[in-house]
Amino acid sequence: MKKGKQPTEPAVLQAFARLLGTKLRNGRMKIPEPYGQGYCRGYVFNEHIRMLILNYELKEEVILHNPEVHMVGKMILFKFQHIFQMEEDRPPAFPSVLIATSTLDTDAVIPIQSSTSSINIEVDAGYLNSIFESSNKSPALQSLLQNTQPLLFEQLIHPVLQKVVDEMMTEQVDEVFELFFLRIKAEELVCRLLMELEKRDEEHLYALNSKDIQAIYKIRERMLARIDVPPVIDELALAANMSPTKLKRLFRQIFGNSIFSYYQEFRMKEAARLLKEEHLSVSDVGYQLGFSNLSHFAKVFKEHVGVNPKKYAMG
């Protein structure tokens, strides 16, 4: 008995097109002008993996009922954020990936945000688990692939990952090879992310709820909004309404780093940006980011970037 032909366009994207009164053409949809601007692309590569590329702005938010909420199998989401070229008037945001289990959010309604710029890759957890069945997996990787409790990880995108994303978005591929090419790139991204997750050293992972996740992200936002002021754990814990121990534990579990190390990494990324893009002097950057000792600033910068700030600015 022959199997039915596998659909190549995600049902959720088809529903979005109908909602906006437009059609998909080879997996692509342009946002109609009355609703906003931008585009969406979607691909179902096989029963194990699919991808959405979203880069649009809507004039107002809409609500889309997800037709695939009850689909068979549990999917793991890899959501790439801040990877497209940003407009000049927008504040800088560093590329990252959210990795989430399907048990984290089981709502049947998806809010379509007014501004979205992301690549979403969904992979069947059972498929991934079967690939790594015989290997000794770290607790982080094992818990993710089991997909039995609500978990969320965020991973910063390093240049190797960004290169794969850029190839996927810009490479001109003949239509006959397009699905195959994009699937290979999507699988490479997933593989490289799992390799990064395998490096995390948490011995035990805690199930997350939406309240705790929101609290942790608000704390991160608060911390990075004042990048010139080192974080004080007790103050952050009070703002998050949780104990310092719980705050530190959940922050490390989600972001793979301690609060201060995470803060320092972003501080040095901002220093690099100010030197290269804003062309500020080394002393101006150091003082702007809260360093009173420029020798200490140069030492910390070199530890993170590999060269001292003066050499980096000239490079």
Image: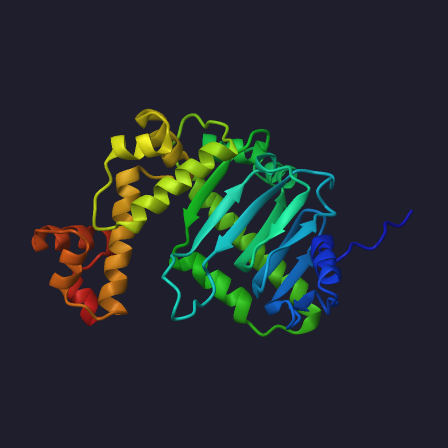
* Image location (x, y in percent) of residue 218: 39, 42
* Image location (x, y in percent) of residue 141: 49, 36
* Image location (x, y in percent) of residue 210: 51, 35
Q: Residue at x 40, y 37 (%)?
A: 216
Q: Nearer the viewer, residue 24 or 295?
A: 24
How many marks the image carries: the answer is: 0
Q: Is residue 56 toward the left or the right of residue 206 in the image? A: right
Q: Residue at x 68, y 42 (%)?
A: 108
Q: Which image quarter is the C terminus in?
A: bottom left
Q: Residue at x 58, y 63 (%)?
A: 58
Q: Nearer the viewer, residue 58 or 283?
A: 58
Q: Quadrant of residue 24?
A: bottom right
Q: Nearer the viewer, residue 194 or 213?
A: 213
Q: Quadrant of residue 26?
A: bottom right
Q: Is residue 139 toward the left or the right of residue 276 in the image? A: right
Q: Is residue 137 visible?
A: no
Please say which color scheme the image uses.
Answer: rainbow
Q: Residue at x 48, y 66 (%)?
A: 166
* Image location (x, y in percent) of residue 301: 19, 54
Q: Is residue 15 visible?
A: yes
Q: Nearer the viewer, residue 194 or 294?
A: 294
Q: Quadrant of residue 308?
A: bottom left
